Image (spheres, helix red, strand yellow):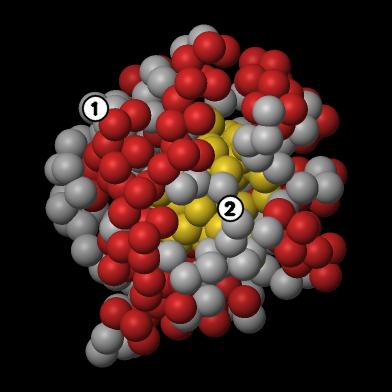
């Protein structure tokens, strides 16, 4: 068990203290991030892009995720570890259970699945079996070919209501956390207020219960030279990686990140 528990995250939501999440893929950065106060380390399948150099997360396998989860576990100093189920690894309930077990055995305390309300049965079964689940909604990068690019989701009345209803259904099914990517701030605020579990945002405005960024993005490193609107480069005002990590933690805690320039409107 980690020092940061689900109960602690729940209390943070209730008290209004922001939760800091950051992606992590290896032992050294897991050590550095958890030491400076990052509460949740996410082994994101973004590793397919930032570590492997692919142009999407689709090539990432469950074996890749197990390997990096084990690396992060070895460096972690008390953070809660969340690991992604990669593309097509949750295509059936059996697969979902088998692959979640692999990630939990490798060191995850929670698994993350991209999806919508159709995930309710999986969320229920995993929770019954002792696997806390974070469901990633909004812009789910594994659906990039369906979306036709990395686009803001939940804009307009119909899509906003559908995303809201999906979040309620997933929370009622027993999810331990929601993660919203690239959704209008106003919608993310409404969802965060409506569910009792912590909601973490990336490109979802300042009113979610916590924030997450991809490690390489917040260190100002990009293979493509492009930076998403919701990213802040924390190396800009820092001369060390430790300094940038601390600055990220402080900025999330004091609400100065995300700022208005990182938000999406409805
Ligand atoms: O894979 C990942 O790093 C993620 C974050 C972008 C939230 O899912």
Q: Quadrant of residue 49?
A: top left
The answer to whether residue 89 is left or right of residue 108 is: left
Q: Residues within 10 Å of mark 2 (few under 14, many from 20)?
A: many
Q: Quadrant of the N terminus?
A: bottom right
Q: Quadrant of the C terminus?
A: top right
- Sequence-earlier tag: 1 or 2: 1
Give the x, y percent position of residue 243.
36, 86
Q: Which residue is identified by label 2? A: 201
* Residue 20 visible in the picture: no
Who's the residue at 50% across and 30% down the image? 101
Quarter location, residue 44:
top left
* Residue at point 67%, 68% (across, down): 18
- On residue 253, the disc is none
How far is disc 1 from disc 2 in space, using C-alphas? 24 Å
Residue 225 in view (yes/no): yes
Residues at circles 1 and 2 in contact by the CB criterion of under 8 Å: no
Cβ of mark 2 under 8 Å from ligand 1: the answer is no
User: In this orientation, which residue lies closer to the viewer: 210 or 173?
Assistant: 173
Where residue 117 sits, quadrant-wise, is top right
Please say if 66 is above or below 244: above
Q: Which residue is mark 1?
A: 59
Q: Position of residue 173 (x, y in %)?
A: 78, 27
**Whole-percent x, y for residue 83 in the image:** 46, 43
Along the viewing direction, whichever of 117 and 261 lies nearer the viewer: 117
Q: In this rendering, would 82 be left or right of 189? A: left
Identity of the residue drawn at 39% across and 18% down? 88
Foreground of the two, 101 or 95? 101
Q: Does residue 209 appear left or right of residue 60 in this picture?
A: right
- Which mark's residue is nearer the viewer, 1 or 2? 1
Q: Secondary structure at mark 1?
A: loop
Q: Secondary structure at mark 2?
A: strand
């Amino acid at each position: 068990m980690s020092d940061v528990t689900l109960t602690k995250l729940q209390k943070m939501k209730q008290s209004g203290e922001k939760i800091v999440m950051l992606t992590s893929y290896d032992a050294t950065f897991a050590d550095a991030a958890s030491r400076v106060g990052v509460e949740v380390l996410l082994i994101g399948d973004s590793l397919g892009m930032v570590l492997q150099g692919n142009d999407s997360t689709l090539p990432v396998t469950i074996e890749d995720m197990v390997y990096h989860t084990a690396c992060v576990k070895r460096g972690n100093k008390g953070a809660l570890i969340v690991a992604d189920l990669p593309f097509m690894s949750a295509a059936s309930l059996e697969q979902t259970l088998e692959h979640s077990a692999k990630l939990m055995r490798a060191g995850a305390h929670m698994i993350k699945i991209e999806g919508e309300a159709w995930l309710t049965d999986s969320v229920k079964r995993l929770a019954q079996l002792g696997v806390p689940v974070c469901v990633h909604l909004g812009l789910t990068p594994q659906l990039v070919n369906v979306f036709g690019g990395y686009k803001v989701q939940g804009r307009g009345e119909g899509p906003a209501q559908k995303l809201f209803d999906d979040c309620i259904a997933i929370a009622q099914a027993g999810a331990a956390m929601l993660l919203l990517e690239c959704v209008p701030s106003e919608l993310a605020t409404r969802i965060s207020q409506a569910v009792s579990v912590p909601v973490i945002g990336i490109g979802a405005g300042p009113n979610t219960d916590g924030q997450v960024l991809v490690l390489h993005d917040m260190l100002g490193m990009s293979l493509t030279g492009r930076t998403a609107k919701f990213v802040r480069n924390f190396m800009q005002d820092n001369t060390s990686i430790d300094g940038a990590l601390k600055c990220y933690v402080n900025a999330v805690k004091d609400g100065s990140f995300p700022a208005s320039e990182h938000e999406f409107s409805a």
